[in-house]
Image (spheres, rainbow, N blue to C red):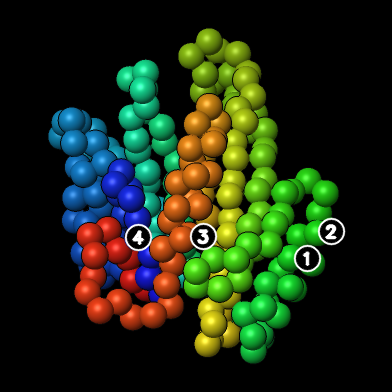
Amino acid sequence: MSFIAPDGFHALPVDADPDDRAAAADEFARGLYPEGDANLWESAAPFYAGLTEVFADVGIAYSAMCVFSDDNGGVVHCSFTVGAVESSHTRPEDAADVIEQGFARDPLTDSRRMTLPCGPAVSNITLREVIIGPEFTATGEECTLLTGQIQVFVPFPKAPFVAVFTLDTAAMDHWGELCDMTAAILQTVSFVEPVEESSGTVSN
């Protein structure tokens, strides 16, 4: 399976050898914060090394921190992961049917059937309110943060697996743009081995 990640995606080294993970995490931190300094990179690298280890252990095939600038000089941040789960389906349409029916029972999510160039898929959107304790806020008062998650389940056409694409963000002022970006990524998903690797193409 392959897909094209846009500019602004900084991929965590989930496929790095465990012995090389610390060095890979240090390189990742420097790429994510190019205007930082040694203190920032050295303090951030162990966190990303640990995060990479967790993701690798649970089978995440691709993980990226996504950082973009907005028109007001601000920063838009989200996380993006891709993994796969086993399925007993023999046809991708059957897997999509089961997933769609499962989400239909949850009234707190927005689930929809999709047809991508690579085949059927099911999207599921969840909005959550996260309470931030006063010890973590600038004002010293408790606050509520609205976060959004987009998950899209794409059955493999010829294998008993379902790819799971997940985007998480607290940048809800840019929710529409992030939805459009996710939709654009999904249009590039392919289960055909690419003849030539394009810039930004990720294969798993």
Cα distance, mark 4 to mark 1?
29 Å
Residue found 60% across the figure and 28% down from its top: 145
Q: Is residue 96 left or right of residue 103?
A: left
**Pointer 4: what residue?**
4
* Label 1 with label 3: CB-CB less than 8 Å: no
Q: Is residue 200 left or right of residue 95?
A: left
* Label 2 with label 1: CB-CB less than 8 Å: yes
Horizontal and vertical percent position of residue 62: 39, 62
**Pointer 3: what residue?**
165
- Three-letter code, disc 2: Arg
Which callout, 1 or 3, points at the residue further toward the start of the chain? 1
**Pointer 1: what residue?**
102
Which callout, 2 or 3, points at the residue further toward the start of the chain? 2
Cα distance, mark 2 to mark 3?
21 Å
Q: Is residue 203 left or right of residue 20?
A: right
Which callout, 4 or 3, points at the residue further toward the start of the chain? 4
Q: Nearer the viewer, residue 188 or 36?
A: 188
Horizontal and vertical percent position of residue 187: 46, 61
The 10 Å Cα crowd at callout 3, few under 14, some 14 to 19, many 20 or more, is many
